[in-house]
Amino acid sequence: MPTFKSFSASIVVEGKHLNEYNVETSSNANGLTIVTCWIPSEAGKKYEVNWTDSYFKHPSDGQVYVDGHYCGGKVLRRKNEIMNQKGIRESPTSVKLFQFSLLNMTDNDETSMIDMPRDIGQIKLRIQYWQLPKAGDGGLYKGQSVPSEQIFNEKAKKGIDHQTRFFETATTKPAYNVGGKALGKCFLEFHFRYRPLDVLRAHGIAPPPPPSAASPASQSGLGKRRRSPVHEDLKPQVAEVIEILDDEDEDPRKEIARLQARLDELRTRHPDTRDRKKIKHDPDAIRVKMEHPMSGPLFIDLT
């Protein structure tokens, strides 16, 4: 919360103080202290201006200006009293509320403001000491006119995305003039420059968003495709070659028996082949042709 000595101020949305960034304090030759900061605005959100004095040596008047428009003020009368300004009082019993809004833009030069006022996108709170009257009050407050919504030309945007509109009306208790007079000049101003949060981040004014929490799957390594450890160390096997000798003097029945013994030996060494389902008439089956001068051609299925 921006603070100078015992005075502090903030912008509140839905009961929460908006974050302030790049809070800076300066003073000019006239003795005016200016506390400046940036706040994130969100279009459609209503807001109010709050301020207080934690020491209170004298009543003080706080005057609120929004986008360069005077929006009224209130007198702070006691220590730690929280003053708030929610909008412009247009009558003794009604207030037009402050609301962040998108700029009303057009490309028509004749119906828009080509030069954007310097105070667009800024909320200003001016504080000066106030002398209250000894008795009585200043009568019923009549209210003030509400600024009309401004229309800006696209050429005049200059990096400003939001303005304040005075749209929704709230009913209040009757308001009365405080009366009294100012003591000295304004000695303190709070300037809240508002922009969308993504704009503040893009310019390095607000910190980047926190990294999203890693999902359990990514933390545990799940979701990544891995090879089964059973197959990691396996090397391609070289198929064994069964040599069939074509001997004219050898009985083909003996050759068939020899080959059958060899197949039985292979099945013993590789028992998983015993459970494989046999497929009849497999076009990929390995067949070996043998020629014998006495019995003619013989075919042996090696699958």
Image (cartoon, rainbow, N blue to C red):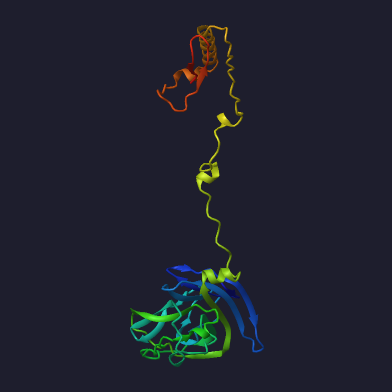
For the residue pair 266 and 179, the one nearer the viewer reads as: 266
Question: Which quarter of the picture shows residue 184?
Answer: bottom right
Point 59% across, 32% down: residue: 232
Q: Is residue 17 visible to us here?
A: yes
Q: Residue furthest front?
A: 293
Position in image of residue 86 (x %, y %): 42, 78
Q: Is residue 62 visible to us here?
A: no
The quadrant of the image that shows the N terminus is: bottom right
Point 47% across, 87% down: residue: 69
The correct choice, above or below, for 99 with respect to 297 in the image is below
Question: Which quarter of the picture shows residue 179?
Answer: bottom left
Position in image of residue 199 (x %, y %): 54, 71
Point 50% across, 87% down: residue: 68
For the residue pair 281 and 174, the one nearer the viewer reads as: 281
In the rendered structure, the answer to whether residue 62 lies left or right of residue 280 reads right
Position in image of residue 283 (x %, y %): 44, 28
Position in image of residue 118 (x %, y %): 55, 86
